[in-house]
Image: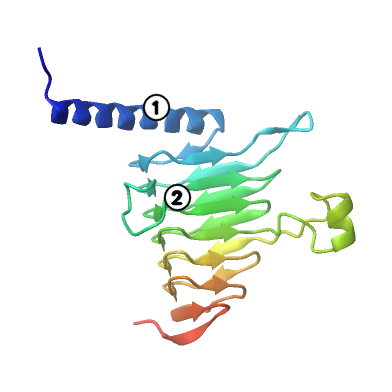
Amino acid sequence: MGYDKNIYIKIKYKLKIVKGIIANYKQLRKYKVKYGKNFILNGKAIFHSGYISGGKTCNGRIYIGDNVSINSGITTNLIGGNTCSIFRTIEAGNIIIGNNVGISNAALVAMDKIVIEDGVLIGGGVIIYDNDFHSINSIIRSTNPCGNIIARPVLIKRGAFIGAHSIILKGVVIGENSIVGAGSVVTKNIPDGEVWAGNPARFIKKAN
């Protein structure tokens, strides 16, 4: 007796989705990620915080507010790029995501703190780093790759929109309702209600 190939493919796809959902929530539980009401996670994301390092438990945590939607994977946001969403804290870093936030295939890595306020949209492939990962001193870097790392908090204020494939670097504050154009590299603060774009990002115009 034969079988319907289309039905087989559909069942296989649904099983893959179910396995992904189970894997996601195992990670959320393992790394003690706190999340609010109506949290939607489309695809398989990576969460990593509060882990054991050098025999001690680090205090980094991830907090996700209400009505947050996260897309993760090539099939969840078809704008290009085979990436997933990554949320990682290093040592005592914190990632704090407010309410009504949308994130697609982004990577957030915090050694100090990354704060995403309410109503922020973060486009596909965006990278937000609050640290340098390695010392900028070549002598220290060659002898101790993880020593003397500079980290400064990142704040993205309410209503901001970060365009796809942009990079937000340490110490940056992005103002309320401001817009970062796609593919930008943001190295300094953006005031409220402005559009910035480019590498490095610069003022383009006032936001509507």
| Kind of residue at badge 1 | Ile
Tell me the residue at 20%/31% (across/down).
Answer: 10
Question: Viewer-proximal residue, 160 or 128?
Answer: 128
Estimate the x, y position of residue 61 in percent, counting from the top left. Answer: 60, 41
Question: Viewer-proximal residue, 95 or 17?
Answer: 17
Q: Is residue 96 above or below residue 126?
A: above
Q: Which circle's residue, 1 or 2, is located before the other in the chain? A: 1
| Kind of residue at badge 2 | Thr
Q: Secondary structure at mark 2?
A: loop
Tell me the residue at 56%/63% (across/down).
Answer: 155
Q: How many marks?
A: 2
Locate residue 137: give its quadrant. Answer: bottom right
Locate residue 163: give its quadrant. Answer: bottom left
The nearer-to-camera label among 1 and 2 is 2
Q: Is residue 31 above or below residue 189?
A: above
Tell me the residue at 15%/27% (across/down).
Answer: 5
Q: Secondary structure at mark 1?
A: helix
- Disc 2 target residue: 83
Q: Is residue 26 above or below residue 206?
A: above
The single residue placed furthest to the bottom in the displayed view is: 205
Estimate the x, y position of residue 104 in percent, counting from the top left. Answer: 40, 54
- Disc 1 target residue: 22
Cα gap from disc 1 to disc 2, whole angstroms: 20 Å
Estimate the x, y position of residue 41 in percent, counting from the top left. Answer: 37, 41
Estimate the x, y position of residue 99 in percent, counting from the top left. Answer: 40, 53
Q: Residues within 10 Å of mark 2 (few under 14, many from 20)?
A: some
